[in-house]
Image (cartoon, rainbow, N blue to C red):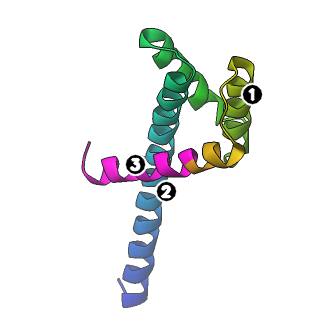
């Protein structure tokens, strides 16, 4: 195997690992975000877990986070939870960092 082939194979492997980590982190972020949102709306116990599953499903509607944001915005508005768009978007980012940190730590 030539040096170029080894480098290419290494780059492909790294890309695959990065993609897998991003997928896992996004799924974990969505669950954490769903539990956070449930708490803000006063949802607890099994209902909070069920809501977190709804949030995970909502993020599968389209590429990016807009589908996720829309679900949270609509649910907060329906429940009278006063959070700005900025606060919701910031929480999405913070939960992604938390998810990445947990995965890197092996949790």
Q: Position of residue 31 (x, y in %)?
A: 48, 32
Q: Which secondary structure dominates the residues rendered in magenta?
A: helix
Does residue 30 sit above or below 90 in this rendering?
Answer: above
Q: Marks 2 and 3: which is nearer the front?
A: 3
Q: Mark 2 and mark 3: span between their CA atoms?
A: 17 Å
The total number of labels drawn is 3
Q: Earlier in the sequence, mark 1 or mark 2?
A: 2
Q: Are marks 2 and 3 in contact (CB under 8 Å)?
A: no
- Left or right placement of residue 105 versus residue 39 in this view: left
Q: Mark 1 and mark 3: span between their CA atoms?
A: 24 Å
Residue furthest to the bottom in view is: 3
The residue lying toward the viewer, choosing from 81 and 30, is 81
Q: Position of residue 2 (x, y in %)?
A: 37, 88
Q: Which residues are magenta?
A: 91-107
Q: Mark 2: give few (<14), some (14-19) or many (20+) Cα within 10 Å.
A: few
Q: Mark 1 and mark 2: span between their CA atoms?
A: 30 Å
Q: Earlier in the sequence, mark 2 or mark 3?
A: 2
- Write down the quadrant of residue 13 in the picture: bottom left
- Left or right placement of residue 53 versus residue 13 in this view: right
Does residue 80 sit above or below 13 in this rendering?
Answer: above
Q: Mark 3: give few (<14), some (14-19) or many (20+) Cα within 10 Å.
A: some
Does residue 17 sit above or below 79 in this rendering?
Answer: below
Residue annotated with mark 2: 19
Q: Position of residue 63 (x, y in %)?
A: 70, 47
Secondary structure type for disc 3: helix
Q: Earlier in the sequence, mark 1 or mark 3?
A: 1
Which label is found at residue 74? 1
Which label is found at residue 36? none
Residue annotated with mark 3: 98
Q: Is residue 20 a member of the stretch shown in magenta? A: no
- Write down the quadrant of residue 32 in the picture: top left
Residue drawn 67% across the image and 46% down it: 65
């Amino acid at each position: 195997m030539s040096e170029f082939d080894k480098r290419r194979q290494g780059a492909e492997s790294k890309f695959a690992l990065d993609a897998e980590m991003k997928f896992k982190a996004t799924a974990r972020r969505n669950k954490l975000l769903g539990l956070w949102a449930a708490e803000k709306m006063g949802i607890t116990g099994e209902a909070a877990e069920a809501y977190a599953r709804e949030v995970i499903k909502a993020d599968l509607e389209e590429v990016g986070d807009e589908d996720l944001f829309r679900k949270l915005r609509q649910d907060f508005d329906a429940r009278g939870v006063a959070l700005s768009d900025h606060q919701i978007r910031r929480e999405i980012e913070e939960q992604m960092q938390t998810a990445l940190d947990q995965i890197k730590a092996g949790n």
